[in-house]
Image (cartoon, rainbow, N blue to C red):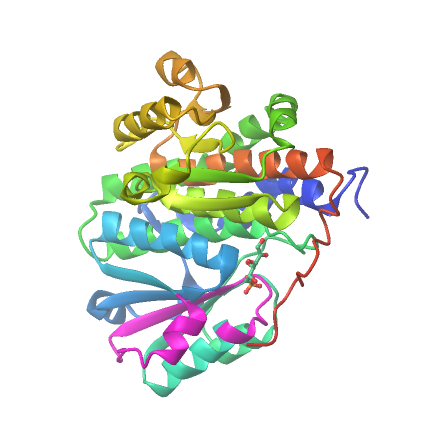
């Protein structure tokens, strides 16, 4: 069943190039420079009239949603927001028929996300699902949506679901962008960049041994910070979530700008910082945060673009990811951090596929 892998998690990490290929197959229209997402079942008129995209989910699915929020605002210039599903459900949210609520759930059974779906429907919003498990409750109740096609995810820690969710959300952003301000050429360029993702992920998987080596230095730390800006902020959140759930090392994901507004007080030689330093807007500022961290003796692991000697020199350890626009680097950088978490947990002798206190699908509120 594990096809020779020691754990389902590792198997699923390595399945990602294929899983993402399946998630994007048939959905990119390169000639017209757009995405085909027929399950959304929106007419051209409805698409143009949409006022806002509201994304709801929990845990890893919520983190993927944050990448979606950034991409939709960035490319389509349309209002987008992500919200933790239970918070959305219980704070009397303002939604109406020109809003589309997109519920993201790997299992399609998460109670909080399902409750948010019902609330949004009651309030008259359009509701769609981004779900992996076919025929699951959220898929059925939303009635419209996009299946992930990631294949079964057995490890409790979500990996390929996240990268497939982000891939689909980027296609949602592309489609919305083409219904608004994107030219055909811009759409074609974005479609090509999304198409390249599986190959870029393969390059990251090729770093597995190097990442395992870096992980050796982390088994004795008790707490860590993950920092990133812009598109790399959701990656910091997801990186921190993954390390805490499988290796039981306390970790916090922060946007790098917030570091100096409090958490910097915690930095010392016992508190490593994982900094997302790959090329793109915000990198130089995050380099500044790395210098501040080093000045407080915090060891730094950088996720850097291959060949970036300046970033390498600023860090104690690095993991390299291939050059790509930041919005697709959300996927490659996350894969690098999945491998990092996996190896730290393995070296610590943790259960990995069945972390304590966690269930694969959380069907109670
Ligand atoms: C983290 C993890 C959880 C789930 C969350 C939502 O690795 O697995 O945070 O992402 O419970 O689950 P779904 O996506 O099934 O709704």
Q: Left or right: where does residue 283 sit relative to residue 139?
A: left
Residue 26 vs 97, above or below: the answer is above
Along the line of sight, the residue nearer the viewer: 302 or 252: 252
315 lies left or right of 259: right
**Residue 222 appears left or right of 293:** right
Residue 48 pos. (x, y %): 21, 65
| Residue at the extreme left of the image, as rendered | 181
**Which quarter of the rendered picture does the C terminus lie within?**
bottom right
Residue 342 x, y percent position in the rendering: 65, 38
Q: Residue drawn 19% across and 56% down?
A: 180
Residue 190: x percent and y percent? 33, 40
> Is 340 or 138 nearer to us in this picture?
340
Q: Residue 28 in magenta?
A: no
Residue name at image x 26 percent, y 32 percent: 281
Determine if residue 67 is in view: yes
The answer to whether residue 215 is above or below residue 158 is above
**Does residue 297 appear to the left or right of 178 in the view shown?**
right
The relative height of residue 323 versus residue 334 in the rendered view (above or below) is: above
Question: Which residue lies at the image location 44% right of the left edge and 53% below the top edge?
Answer: 63
Residue closer to the observer: 304 or 350: 350
Residue 33 occupies quadrant = top left
| Image location (x, y in percent) of residue 280 | 30, 30
Task: Kindly indicate the quadrant of the structure image that contains residue 144.
Answer: bottom left
Q: Judge whether 273 appears above or below 248 on screen.
A: above
Residue 25: tell me if it is visible. no
Q: Give the range drawn in magenta.
A: 84-112
The quadrant where ligand 1 appears is bottom right
Count of all numbered marks drawn on residues in the image: 0
């Amino acid at each position: 069943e594990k096809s020779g892998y020691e754990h389902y998690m590792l198997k699923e990490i390595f399945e990602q190039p294929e899983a993402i290929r399946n998630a994007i197959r048939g959905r990119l229209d390169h000639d017209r420079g757009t995405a085909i997402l027929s399950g959304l079942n929106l007419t051209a008129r409805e698409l143009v009239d949409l006022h806002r995209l509201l994304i709801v989910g929990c845990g890893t699915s919520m983190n993927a949603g944050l990448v979606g929020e950034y991409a939709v605002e960035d490319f389509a210039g349309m209002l987008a927001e992500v919200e933790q599903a239970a918070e959305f459900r219980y704070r009397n949210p303002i939604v109406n028929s020109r809003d589309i609520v997109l519920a993201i759930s790997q299992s399609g059974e998460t109670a909080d996300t399902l409750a948010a779906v019902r609330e949004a429907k009651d309030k008259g919003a359009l509701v769609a699902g981004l779900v992996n498990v076919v025929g699951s409750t959220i898929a059925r109740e939303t009635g419209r949506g996009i299946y992930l096609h990631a294949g079964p995810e057995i490890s409790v820690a979500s990996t390929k679901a996240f990268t497939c969710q982000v891939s689909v959300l980027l296609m949602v952003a592309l489609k919305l962008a083409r219904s608004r301000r994107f030219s055909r050429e811009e759409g074609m360029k974005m479609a090509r960049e999304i198409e390249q993702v599986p190959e870029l992920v393969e390059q990251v998987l090729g770093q597995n041994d190097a990442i395992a080596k870096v992980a050796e230095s982390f088994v004795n730390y008790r707490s860590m910070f993950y920092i990133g800006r812009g598109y790399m902020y959701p990656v910091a959140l997801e990186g921190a979530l993954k390390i805490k759930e499988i290796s039981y090392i306390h970790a916090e994901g922060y946007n790098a700008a917030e570091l100096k507004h409090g958490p910097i007080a915690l930095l010392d030689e016992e508190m490593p910082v994982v900094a997302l330093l790959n090329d793109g807007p915000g990198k130089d500022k995050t380099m500044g945060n790395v210098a501040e961290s080093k000045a407080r003796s915090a060891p730094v692991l950088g996720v850097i673009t291959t060949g970036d000697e300046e970033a390498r020199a600023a860090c104690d350890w690095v993991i390299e990811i291939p050059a790509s626009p930041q919005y697709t680097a959300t996927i490659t950088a996350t894969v690098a951090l999945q491998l990092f978490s996996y190896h730290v947990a393995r070296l610590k002798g943790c259960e990995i596929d069945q972390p304590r206190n966690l269930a694969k699908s959380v069907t109670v509120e």
